[in-house]
Image: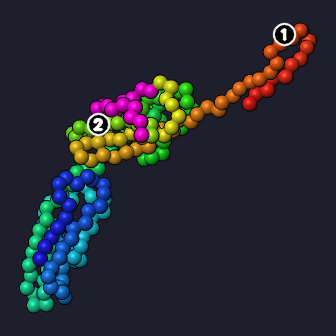
Amino acid sequence: VRATGPTGTICGGGSIELIGSATESGLSYKWTKGSEEVSTTANYTINQAYSSHSGMYVFTATNEYGCSADASVTITVTDPIEVAISVNGNQITANNPVSICEGSSVTLTAVKPEGEIREYTYTLKNGESTIGTSSNGSYNIQNPTPGTYTLEVATGSCATTYTVLTVHAKPVVSISGETTTICAGGSTTLTAE
């Protein structure tokens, strides 16, 4: 029998598939982690994986006579990246950005959970343009240009991107009228477009 799974450090929050295989047909299967049986199918999927899912998984194939064979795979999962993000003091939820008009100033702060010991790197972008990279998650932006701003939070080989801010362009207004001198009591027409 054979057991396979992803190698290296797996970023938390995603799904993981462990695959068991055997050369014979008509076998029964099970996956165990320690003393816990976690699946009775050849393939085992872990949805929303966390560090608690790290460890050795044993795949067992058993024939009709009760004879069995084992194979194992070990996986290492990090916890998902989580930060609390505020824009101008307003807490935002996942990918529910704050909207402002251009010409405003912006203070953006990202705070990792208390007790989180991993080092985070924060990269703020407007579209594909990088505004800046920070190790403390704080940004002060004067007169941000219109666009959709994202904050990428990374640690090690894992990263999560949050949509944090939408800056809307102001309407363009022009005024036209006669260039002339008007006597008191006279009139003219001004047109705004």
Query: What is the span of residues highlighted in magenta in the rendered image?
Result: 128-141
Nearest to the eye among marks 1 and 2: give it.
1
The answer to whether 179 appears left or right of 102 in the picture is right
Residue 51 seen in render:
no
Near-viewer residue (109 or 147): 147
The answer to whether 172 appears left or right of 46 in the picture is right
Gap in angstroms between the C-alphas marked 1 and 2: 61 Å
Residue 2 seen in render:
yes
Against 171, residue 150 (above or below) is below
Give yes or no for residue 154 being in the magenta stretch: no
**Residue at mark 2:** 121
**Residue at mark 1:** 181
- Please name the amino acid that badge 1 sits on: Thr
Q: Residues within 10 Å of mark 1 (few under 14, many from 20)?
A: few
- Residue 170 drawn at (x, y percent): 61, 31
Considering every residue shown, the one lying at the far right of the view is: 185
Residue in the image at 29% along x and 37% along y = 121
- Residue 165 drawn at (x, y percent): 48, 38
Q: Earlier in the sequence, mark 1 or mark 2?
A: 2
Residue in the image at 11% along x and 68% along y = 72
- Please name the amino acid that badge 2 sits on: Thr
